């Protein structure tokens, strides 16, 4: 019996892998769409990892720029304070 989409979504990844492996043993050779889907999955994973790297770099740059801005404001405030004395 085939699972419904809702049942498949509830299954753990390990269960899905075991189910896939058992079906693949009896199915024979995969079709071309199998290879296209795997290529697309790998390309998506590569793109996602690249975007994650860029996101981390942007977060780091934002933290550094914020810290430098705070330091700049403090130094400007101190210079005004000492200029009036």
Image (cartoon, grey):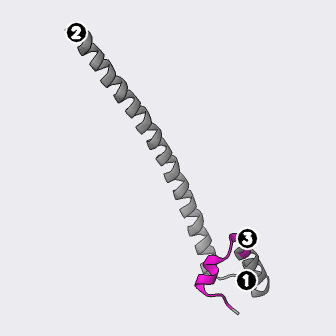
69 versus 14 height, above or below: above
Task: Quadrant for residue 45, please give it.
Answer: bottom right
Callout 1: SS: loop
- In the image, which disc is placed on residue 14? 3
The image position of residue 2, as x and y in percent, is: 67, 90
- Give percent across and percent down for residue 71: 37, 24
Q: Residues within 10 Å of mark 1 (few under 14, many from 20)?
A: few
On whether residue 67 falls in the magenta region, the answer is no
Please give the residue where the numbered disc 1 appears in the rendered image: 29
Q: Secondary structure at mark 3?
A: helix
Query: In the orientation shown, which residue stands out farthest toward the bottom?
Result: 1
How would you rate the neighbour count of disc 2 (Cα within 10 Å): few for under 14, some for 14-19, many for 20 or more? few
45 to 72, vertically: above or below: below
Q: Residue at x 30, y 15 (%)?
A: 78
Check disc 2 and report the residue beneath it.
83
Q: Nearer the viewer, residue 26 or 68?
A: 68
Q: Is residue 76 left or right of residue 8?
A: left
- Name which quarter of the figure residue 40 lies in: bottom right
Q: How many residues crowd mark 3 within 10 Å: few (<14), some (14–19), many (20+)?
A: few
Q: Which residue shows up at 59% across the image and 84% down it? A: 5
Which secondary structure, mark 2? helix
Quarter of the image with the C terminus in it: top left
Mark sitting earlier along the chain (2/3): 3
Residue 21 locus on image (x, y percent): 76, 77
Q: Is residue 10 left or right of residue 25?
A: left
- The region drawn magenta spans 2-15
| Quadrant occupied by the N terminus | bottom right
Which circle's residue, 2 or 1, is located before the other in the chain? 1
Question: Which one is nearer the viewer's eye here, 13 or 50?
Answer: 13
The secondary structure that dominates the magenta segment is helix
């Amino acid at each position: 019996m085939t699972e419904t989409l809702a049942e498949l979504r509830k299954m753990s990844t390990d269960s899905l892998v075991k189910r896939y492996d058992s079906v693949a043993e009896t199915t024979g050779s995969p079709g071309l769409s199998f290879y296209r889907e795997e290529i697309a999955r790998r390309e998506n994973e590569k793109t996602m990892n690249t975007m994650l790297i860029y996101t981390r770099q942007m977060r780091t740059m934002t933290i550094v720029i914020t810290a430098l801005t705070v330091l700049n404001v403090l130094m400007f405030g101190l210079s005004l304070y000492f200029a009036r004395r």
